[in-house]
Image (cartoon, rainbow, N blue to C red):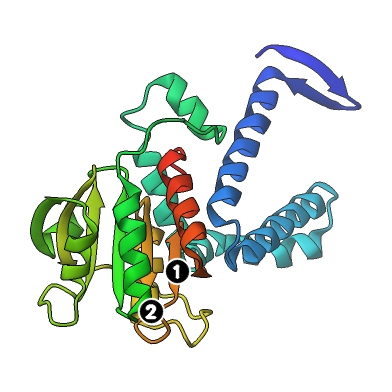
Amino acid sequence: MLFLFDIGTLDVRLTDIVDLLLVSLLLYRIYKLIAGSMTVKIFIGFLLLSLTYLIVRLAGMLLATAILGKFMEVGALAIVILFQQEIRRFLFWIGGTTTLSSHELLGRLLGKKKRGKPGVDITPIVEAAKALAGSNTGALIVLSKTDGLKFYKESGDLIDAVVSKRLLLAIFSRQSPLHDGGVIIYNNKITTARSILPVTERRDLPPQFGLRHRAAIGMTEVTDTLVLAISEETGQISVARNGTLEHNLSVQETRAAINAYLHSSHKY
């Protein structure tokens, strides 16, 4: 291996530098995935525990090494249990890189954004959300930048129609048989209505968030989508993205959130 320099009695090779850079990049991407969630504290705690274990082991502290070693033995299992949603999102992100060029893959790893024109005319969506909120009509609207939602589309009824305010209002009308579940919008079309969305298993949500808001969060935990949730009780508009929910948004804030999603790179 190519020798670069030494620090005291420690030889530093080129592979050591590459190893450090790869681990740092991996930890950075994991942190970006869980940033803003409760699990970020658990992640930091686990890193500190791992670092402490390495230090006491290198220092030859036998008792501390033995005690911390027991924790590290079950570390893999604990990570799977504690970070189920985050591991799923990370694997989804990794899987999404298989069709990218090397340049695009590097850009994704570094978190660079790819600019492009949105594939959806958001004005009818925003106007429909405003009207639904004004009449306290509950709604779930899923916006997707990719056509990878086959499982969720098959759970609903095929619409395949250009997005329009009147169509969205008709779907979510209380008298409509399609108002339950979510509408999925892709490539400026309402592809399906009455689609069944996954519900988050998080237990730290405020009690005022019902099944509709939990479904909005759950959908964005496992897919690269943005979900509008309109409360039937309060008429407030919420936006879910990457497993987090922004609550009680204005029409302008809703428009800005949709634009930011459509112009952002794939965050997973």
Q: Is residue 228 left or right of residue 195?
A: right
**Element at badge 1?**
strand
Amino acid type of the residue that numbered disc 2 sits on in the rendered structure: Ser
Q: Are marks 1 and 2 in contact (CB under 8 Å)?
A: yes
Mark identifier at residue 131: none
Q: Nearer the viewer, residue 94 or 254?
A: 254
At a point 38% along the width and 21% down the height, the residue shown is: 101
Q: Nearer the viewer, residue 195 or 89?
A: 195
Q: Is residue 151 left or right of residue 78?
A: left
Residue 196 appears in the rendering: no
The percent position of residue 238, horizontal first and vertical second, equals 45, 69
Residue to which mark 2 is pinned = 231
Q: Is residue 135 left or right of residue 263?
A: left
The percent position of residue 239, horizontal first and vertical second, equals 44, 63
Identify the mark nearer the N-term, 1 or 2: 2
Amino acid type of the residue that numbered disc 1 sits on in the rendered structure: Ser
Residue 133 appears in the rendering: yes
Q: Quadrant of residue 105?
A: top left
**Label 2: few (<14), some or many (≥20) within 10 Å?**
many
The percent position of residue 229, horizontal first and vertical second, equals 37, 70
* Placement of 210 over or under 60, stated as above or below: below
Q: Nearer the viewer, residue 54 or 237?
A: 237
Residue to which mark 1 is pinned = 238
